[in-house]
C-alpha cells in the first residue's frame, strides 16, 4: 500500500542555510483534511544532519485541540539518526499519542529531545552532546513536558545541561541512564530533575565517568516545584540528592538512592 504520509529510507542533509530550517517538519496546524481522529504520520529509517532549525519537528495546534483536522496524533518515528542541528534534535510540539523508537541524536545546540504533548511512548533512544554544537549551551538530553508518558531503555550522555528534565504527571519510566552530563551548566546540574512530577514511577541510574578536567553533573537527583505521590528509584555514582529548590510532598514518595 502506498502511504503518502510515510517517509522512509531517506538521507536529509541541508548544508548551509541563512535562516532556521527544520530537517523534516510535519506541520498539522493548518489542517490536512484527514478523515480519522489521529493524523498517523510515519517516519522510518531517516538520517538528518546539518540543520539550522530542529532536526525533526512534529507540530500540532494547541488552540485547535478539539478540531481533529489540526491535531497531530499517533505519529510513529523509528530508526532515525540526527546529527549537528542548531535547534532541537527531535521536537514534539503539541503532538500527542506518539510512538518513538530507536532514535539516536548527537551534537545539537538545543535539547536533544523536547516532548510537549501527552501520552507519548519512547523506547531505546539516546541523546549525546546536546548543547555542545558551539560549546556553550546547557541543553538537556531530554526535556519532557507531556503527561501520561512512558520512557524505557534510554540514555543521555555528555550533554551540556541535565540528563533528564521531567515536568509532568503520570509518567512510567524504567532503565534510564544519565551519564556524565552537565558539561556547560552555569549552576548545578543533575542526572534527573523532577519538576512538579506527581503520580509517577521514575527508575534509573546516574553516573559520571572519570574524565580529567571535565565538568559533569553535580547530583543524581534534584527536585523543583512540588514532587509528590511517586515511586522514585535512582542508583548513582555522583553526589546523591541536589538542593531541593522545591517541595517534597507528603504523598507516597519512596526514594531509593544508593551507590
Image: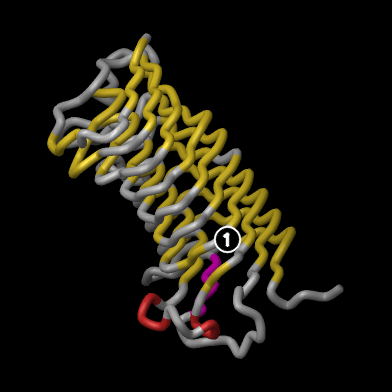
Residue 112 lies left or right of residue 138; in this view the side is right
Query: What segment carries the magenta color?
Result: 24-28
Instruction: Give the x, y percent position of residue 126.
Output: 52, 38
Q: Quadrant of the N terminus?
A: bottom right
Quickly name the residue at label 1: 13
Instruction: Give the x, y percent position of residue 258.
Output: 35, 12
Q: Please determine whether, in this image, residue 182 is positioned above or below residue 144.
A: above
How many discs appear? 1
- Mark 1, secondary structure of its residue: strand
Q: Residue at x 55, y 67 (%)?
A: 24
* Residue 107 visible here: yes
Residue 115 lies left or right of residue 121; in this view the side is left
Q: Nearer the viewer, residue 226 or 166?
A: 226
Residue 5 lies left or right of residue 73; in this view the side is right
State the image quarter where residue 220 is shown: top left
Q: Residue at x 65, y 70 (%)?
A: 40
Instruction: Give the x, y percent position of residue 94.
Output: 42, 68
Magenta segment includes 218? no
Secondary structure mostly seen in the magenta stretch: strand
Magenta segment includes 27? yes
State the image quarter where residue 186 is shown: top left
State the image quarter where residue 241 is shown: top left
Q: Residue at x 34, y 17 (%)?
A: 257
Q: Nearer the viewer, residue 231 or 49?
A: 231
Name of the residue lying farthest toward the front: 251
Instruction: Give the x, y percent position of residue 31.
Output: 52, 87
Amino acid at each position: 500500500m502506498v502511504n503518502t504520509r510515510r517517509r522512509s529510507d531517506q538521507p536529509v542533509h541541508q548544508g548551509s542555510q541563512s535562516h532556521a530550517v527544520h530537517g523534516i517538519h510535519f506541520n498539522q496546524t493548518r489542517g490536512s483534511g484527514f478523515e480519522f481522529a489521529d493524523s498517523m504520520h510515519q517516519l522510518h529509517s531517516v538520517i538528518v544532519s546539518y540543520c539550522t532549525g530542529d532536526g525533526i519537528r512534529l507540530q500540532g495546534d494547541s488552540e485547535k485541540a478539539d478540531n481533529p483536522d489540526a491535531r497531530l496524533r499517533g505519529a510513529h518515528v523509528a530508526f532515525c539518526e540526527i546529527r549537528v542541528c542548531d535547534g532541537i534534535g527531535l521536537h514534539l510540539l503539541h503532538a500527542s499519542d506518539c510512538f518513538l523508537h530507536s532514535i539516536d541524536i548527537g551534537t545539537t545546540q538545543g535539547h536533544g529531545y523536547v516532548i510537549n504533548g501527552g501520552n507519548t511512548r519512547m523506547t531505546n533512544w539516546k541523546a549525546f552532546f546536546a548543547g555542545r554544537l558551539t560549546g556553550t549551551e546547557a541543553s538537556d538530553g531530554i526535556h519532557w513536558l507531556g503527561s501520561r508518558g512512558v520512557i524505557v531503555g534510554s540514555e543521555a550522555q555528555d550533554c551540556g545541561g541535565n540528563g533528564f528534565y521531567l515536568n509532568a504527571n503520570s509518567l512510567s519510566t524504567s532503565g534510564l541512564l544519565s551519564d556524565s552530563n552537565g558539561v556547560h551548566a552555569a549552576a548545578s546540574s543533575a542526572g534527573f530533575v523532577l519538576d512538579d512530577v506527581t503520580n509517577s514511577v521514575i527508575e534509573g541510574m546516574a553516573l559520571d565517568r572519570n574524565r580529567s578536567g571535565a565538568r559533569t553533573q553535580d547530583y543524581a537527583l534534584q527536585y523543583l516545584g512540588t514532587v509528590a505521590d511517586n515511586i522514585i528509584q535512582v542508583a548513582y555514582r555522583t553526589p546523591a540528592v541536589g538542593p531541593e529548590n522545591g517541595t517534597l510532598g507528603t504523598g507516597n514518595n519512596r526514594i531509593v538512592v544508593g551507590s
